[in-house]
Amino acid sequence: MKEESMFFYFFFKKGAFMKKESKFQADLIKEIKELLPGSYILKNDPLYIQGIPDLLILYKNRWALLECKRSAKEKQQPNQKYYIEKFGKMSFASFIYPENKKEVLRELQRAFGVGGNTCVSKR
């Protein structure tokens, strides 16, 4: 496959641009830090425990886990659903992707007892 063809294969789907998961995750971390000032966001090592969600969010006396996907159609890895359900019963855990990002961030704010809008100002 030519380099140009590979670019379109990996980054375009049905004519729409899809962010790489790493770019989506980096942008999401910045957005969460603005929504939850003073929070700590740690990236989990996927090789340590297979299926553990990508991000651990610590805010005041609360915590949450998020598993980032670049789209709602992205395949789940073994054990990911198990850990999201398990940790969701303990605190807050969710899959997050561009299609559900606003909803998940709103739920995260509710779980942390923080009000406000999920829109981040572009100052």
Image: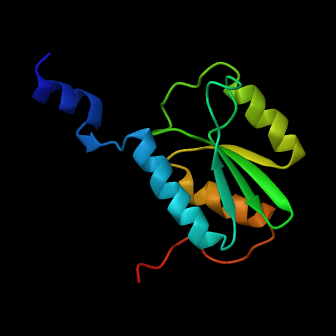
From the top left corner, tell me how far across and down residue 57 is, in percent: 70, 54
From the top left corner, tell me how far across and down residue 44 is, in percent: 65, 39
From the top left corner, tell me how far across and down residue 97 is, in percent: 52, 45
Residue pictured at 19% horizontal, 25% vertical:
6
Q: Is residue 118 left or right of residue 88?
A: left
Residue pictured at 65% horizontal, 18% vertical:
78
In the image, is residue 2 above or below residue 109?
Answer: above
Viewer-nearest residue: 46 or 71: 46
Tally of marks: 0
From the top left corner, tell me how far across and down residue 24 is, in percent: 44, 48
Looking at the rendering, which quadrant does residue 104 occupy? bottom right
Q: In the picture, which quadrant includes the C terminus? A: bottom left
Direction top: furthest residue = 1
Coloured how?
rainbow
Q: In the picture, which quadrant includes the N terminus? A: top left
In the image, is residue 24 above or below residue 2?
Answer: below
In the image, is residue 120 above or below residue 102?
Answer: below
On the question of residue 46 being in view, the answer is yes
On the question of residue 98 being in view, the answer is no
Residue pictured at 58% horizontal, 25% vertical:
76
Q: Is residue 54 left or right of residue 62?
A: left
Residue pictured at 68% horizontal, 60% vertical:
40
Q: Is residue 113 left or right of residue 65?
A: right
Q: Is residue 105 left or right of residue 12?
A: right
Direction bottom: furthest residue = 123
